Amino acid sequence: MLFKFFGKKHKKEDFLVLDIGTTCTKVYYLNIPGTDSNEKEKFFVKDHLVLENECEIFDKDFLENLEKIKKIIEAKNEINEIKYIVFVVSGRHSFGKGNYFLYERKNPQRRIDNDEMNDILEIASKKVFVRPIGSIFKFRADEFDVINTIVTDLEIDHEKSESIVGKQGKVVKIGIYNSFASKEILELFERIADVLNSEIESIVPSGFSIFKVLDQSSITEKEKKDYLLINMGFSSSEVTLIKNGLVLENWSIEIGTKDLENAMSSSLDVNSGIIHSLILGSGGKGMKHYQNKKIVESISESFLNTILSAIETYLEEIEDLEKVKINKNITLYFYGGFSETWLFQKSIEKSKMVNYGFKSVVLFPKNVNLGLKFDGRKIFSTLDTSSIAAMSFFCNFLMDRNESEK
């Protein structure tokens, strides 16, 4: 299905954006001016906070905490009710698949109408399907549902176009990205919406969102064709493969910051809380006089090499399954979590990149302008969470929809 907000009349509305992670949940209150507002090109982050997940996200207590937070935000901002929720989905609960599809029309002289366009989309989306059960992604196909079908590229008779409705031609080439989410997490989203007395406006794929936002920036200018995005999470890491300017794959590897913390905790015989604050936090200031500094750096280097090895294995299996050639001499862009620490930078310097054939490993710069507004002012945000890009992605689509409604 297409994003829900396509074709939906838009007035000034309030949205709650929820990015639910393993260890914490990021909550944003978004206010978007209506179509008739002179501020229709802007959207505003009016409030945001981070909740530590003190219980499992599927527990009743977690839902009750979210309900309390929503009421606090509503009272603080003097609004009756935030009616719509935008969920950010990532990690082990999601994956994505993209590809190109060629459609040969029976009557090239006939102009394409909306019905034919929808038929083309439906056929194309079914061609971009899940891998067989028992593949490297370690899930059953029947445990996931398609949540979004996104058009990433569109051509008719080799001519690129924003829309082919109303045009003539024989061959339609369409780039499609299908985003999938686990039925388990979708059921949780429904429960949250019910408890908060709100409607699900959209479910936004984080990896694809990061790609779309950065693709419009100069950050990956030299790597427009092929590169990898790696979002370092706590319990898992999300990898997005861009090939020929198209998101070919988005998947999760079961390696995260917690594995690094556990390895350090075991080797140094200290609890993970100390590891987190002393070594990973505070810019690593606590390490200046830490007697086991070399051990810490060695564990970190080994951890990064484990990630690189896992990515290498996945790329090889994707090649085999998809029958496509993937050039491994590409740049890997890391963001979020452990990748933003001094220790990660140290690990990059010592990593045996040549063993994996990758071109280079890059840490995104601290300040990246994603075009967000906070209290009416432009803000710069570090890429420590994909929810920032997801909001930008969601709002860009919303504004594009408004423009088409004029």
Image: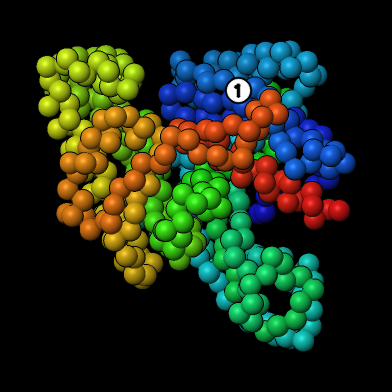
Q: Is residue 398 left or right of residue 124?
A: right
Question: Residue 74: x percent and y percent?
Answer: 73, 17
User: Image quadrant of residue 201?
Assistant: top right
- Describe residue 35's horizontal placement relative to residue 238 as left or right: right
Quadrant into which the N terminus falls: bottom right
Residue 406 in sight: yes
- Of residues 110 and 50, which is closer to you in this image? 50
Label 1: how many Cα within 10 Å (few below 14, some 14–19, many 20+): some
Quarter of image, res 195: top right
Circle 1: residue type = His
390 over 374 or under it: above or below: below
Residue 165: horizontal and vertical position, in percent? 76, 70
Q: Position of residue 236 (x, y in %)?
A: 36, 37
Viewer-proximal residue among 252 and 283: 283
Mark 1 highlights which residue?
48
Secondary structure state at the residue bearing disc 1 = strand
Indicate whether 115 appears above or below 221.
below
